Image: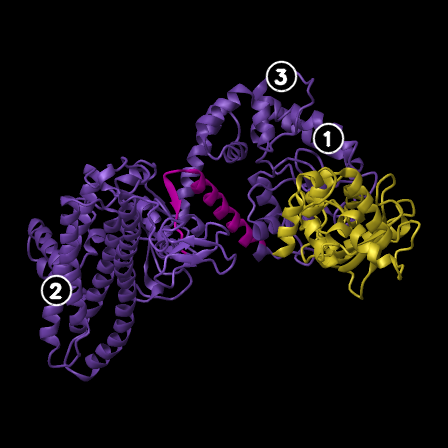
Chain colours: A purple, B yellow
Amino acid sequence: MSSDYEFSDDDNEFFDDEDMFDATQDDGSSDEMDMDADGDDFKITPKNKRKSYEIEYHSLSQSEVEKQMREEVNYICNILGVEPSTASLLLRSMSWNRERLIEKYMDNPSTVLTAAGITLPEPPSSPLQNPIRTHAASGSSSSSTVRRTTRSASKLLGLGSSSKSSPTTRTSPIVQHTTPKYTKFTTKPDEPFVCPICFDDAPNLVTLSLDCGQTFCINCWNMYIVSKIRDEGEIAIRCMAEGCQLIAPDPFIHDVLFPTPPADASAMSVNPQDNAQAWSRFQELLARHFVGSKKDLKYCPYPGCTNTVSCPAGASKFSLTTVVPTVFCGARGIPGQENSDSSLGLGGREHKFCFGCAVEDDHRPVVCSVAKMWLRKCRDDSETANWIKSNTKECSNCQSTIEKNGGCNHMTCKKCKHEFCWVCMGPWSEHGTAWYTCNRYDEKAGVEARDAQSRSRASLERYLHYYNRWANHEQSAKLSRDLYAKTEKKMEDMQITSSLTWIEVQFMKKAVEEVEKCRMTLKWTYAMAYYLARGNEKDLFEDNQRDLEKAVEDLSELLESPIEAEVIPSLRQKVTDKAVYVQKRNEIVLEDTANGFLEGRWRWNVTVEGFDEPDKSELVL
Amino acid sequence: MDARLRRVNKEIADCKNDKTSNIQIDLVDESPFHLKGSFPGPEGTPYEGGRFEVDIVIPESYPFQPVKMKFITKVYHPNISSASGAICLDILKDAWSPVLTLKSTLISLQSLLCSPEPNDPQDAEVAKHYTTSKASFEETARYWTQVYAGGPGQRKGKNPSKGSVHDDIAIAGLERVHVERFENLGFDRNKVIDVLRRLNYRGSNVAQITDDRVVEELLK
């Protein structure tokens, strides 16, 4: 492809701009036709109109998510007049619901600040003259001195911390957390400082404390923070003192992990590499918390992937009854593993997932709630119970389950020796003289009882019909993938031994991908058909399903035909044609089903969450 | 020096020097990270007079992660597993703080013995016993203290002869008459004890559990 492109470019240098533009465009699209005769084009050409079975979304990298977070933080900074790290803690404590935060904060700032772990609880008598500033000024000075007397460690620094921290907070509350006020060197104290955690008493010990004034050495802070982030995945890192509810703001954590001046490596128990790792993990956890709090954002569920998808159209519960929000995060493969985009193996797959549920990454065309219902039905093994229902009865005396093994209706329970009639379930003794003919129910009731029994059997068979096809498509998709792995090798060998070019042996991959995609569609159409109410709409649906299935099976068969060098050109032609046809059929199924959801055309034979109740006549079972 | 080692050594030394709290910490083997703590049962409780031993394992990231503790001595208490000695206490989990020490944690365990939390139980059967009849629970707890923690009592903990028969019933916190009544129906004594304990056949509950129900369970 690249050589083609270059050639045409050179050619076009002789034409004027307009011609060149046209020519390259033509070139580009014909290239695509040759290369990507498959359904991938909807990703490559975003200019195309969105199809009705696709949903509008865009993917975000972690840095883009962080940018959004910063915007929200700045918004809060401007409105509440607090500095960024405080705004960030406030937002986190309110699950990033800024409207609720503003409302609550305006109502009672000190409660909100205390709940967010920014200030210590105030003594009840303290007057609230200037609510916005209280947290910075009176919060840290008044209540911390109260606590200080009760703490064993505090007596050592009572003087140093109050004289050093209160003036800074009082004069400029806005820069409170950005100045490195946490980092305090114990400058000529009256008594030597002993860290209450590690009992280190070195004279040059760097010590830090949060606003509560409870001081510990930087090594302990460091190990504590790293352990909280790395081992517990915690973003709200509390003060190390027992029962203290203050949460370390981000600049504090940064100061601890990246101390200035750089700590003496030999004195540090945690190495700088661990610190850097902990910091980036912390950033990731923050982004995850933000994404987790937002309804229209979802983290890519693939291992190691840090992308996020924003899909407002798939965020509401109601929208999930009209669309199947299948999205791609934009990444492929598993980070850190070497793989090429073209690889068919799991390693190179696109990160595709459903925005609405965690049931399966792509369950188009069927909506989340129905897909979930179907899987639950398959998993619950509820059909075992159904079998028992249609083949057995419970002893009316001891409730043991009994399978009738003879023709006689005179049953004797093996366990409790209770004798009863299989037809009416009443005790046998009451049958009196009417031995062997149960006339306790009139004829109509007898017919109904038989009907109920046969209905139950029919429903079992119906379920198995759909289940077997559902499971079979999944299995087939897997098998065709395995088959391709073998074929691919053979084809590449052939390219070396014969005159075939690389491009000529590449048609199989696209076809296999197409087959796999369509089998996934087919698989889920069976789940959908199982729940669709009988009628014209279902007939049309099943017609489309049948056409797709036939096309897929044909293509599948072609893919399994023997590969010989001489037949390859004609095979290639056939496979390519068929693949295009299959793709069309798949589009039709997806498009028609999606339109049906938008129009509210589908009726179910069971109650489905979010849809109208089915009519009595449509109900099955 | 390794900060963890320095801290643990200091904690052990502090405990040795402190004679007032009567809390003891000993090495189990050479490693200072596997210890055995012990403390007296608090006064005015069924645990009074006993001495309770606790298995202590210091994790790699101590003191930033909580120390792992469980009772070696069997204790009859709603928040302590009567089988494994596992402890349900917030400071050993998410409420842990690095400023807490082995000594302060052992003191917390001591005060846990004073104030059981039957609403957040580790051992559901013991908790049920506690809520059904506190007097009967305390009697059993006292008996366990006697037998396992070397507590005072008329009878010494390890009394052979006739005592062992009585022991099983008292250890399960049941009434001798109840057990014997079902035993006389021809059921094995151990089975009767097991079923009655499971059904919480104590105090006011006795009136609510019919004999049929007990027999049904015994037949299972």
Q: Chain of mark 2?
A: A
Q: Quadrant of the N terminus of chain A?
A: bottom left
Does label 1 lie on the same chain as label 2? yes
- Mark 1 crowdedness (10 Å alpha carbons): few <14, some 14-19, many ≥20: some
Q: Chain of mark 1?
A: A
Image marks 2 and 1: residues in contact by CB distance under 8 Å: no
Q: Residue at x 60, y 48 (%)?
A: A228
**Marks 2 and 1, how far apart at CA:** 80 Å
Determine which of the numbered discs, if any, sits on residue A128 in the image.
3
Residue B174 at least partly seen:
no
In the image, is residue B55 above or below residue A319?
below
Residue A194, by quadrant, is top right
- Closer to the eye: label 2 or 1: 2
Of the residues under marks 1 and 3, which one precedes in the sequence? Answer: 3
- Mark 3 crowdedness (10 Å alpha carbons): few <14, some 14-19, many ≥20: few
State whether the magenta stretch is mostly helix, strand or loop. Answer: helix
**The residue stretch that appears in magenta:** A275-302
Of the residues under marks 2 and 1, which one precedes in the sequence? Answer: 1
Determine which of the numbered discs, if any, sits on residue A162 in the image.
1
Of the residues under marks 3 and 2, which one precedes in the sequence? Answer: 3
Element assignment for label 2:
helix
In the image, is residue B207 above or below residue A406?
above
Q: Label 2: which residue?
A: A578
Q: Is residue A362 left or right of residue A588?
A: right
* Amino acid type for the residue under numbered disc 2: Lys
In x, y percent, where is residue A536?
13, 44
In x, y percent, where is residue A598?
21, 38
- Closer to the eye: label 3 or 2: 2
**Marks 1 and 3, how far apart at CA:** 21 Å
Q: Is residue B45 left or right of residue A13?
A: right
Determine which of the numbered discs, if any, sits on residue A421 in the image.
none
Element assignment for label 3:
loop
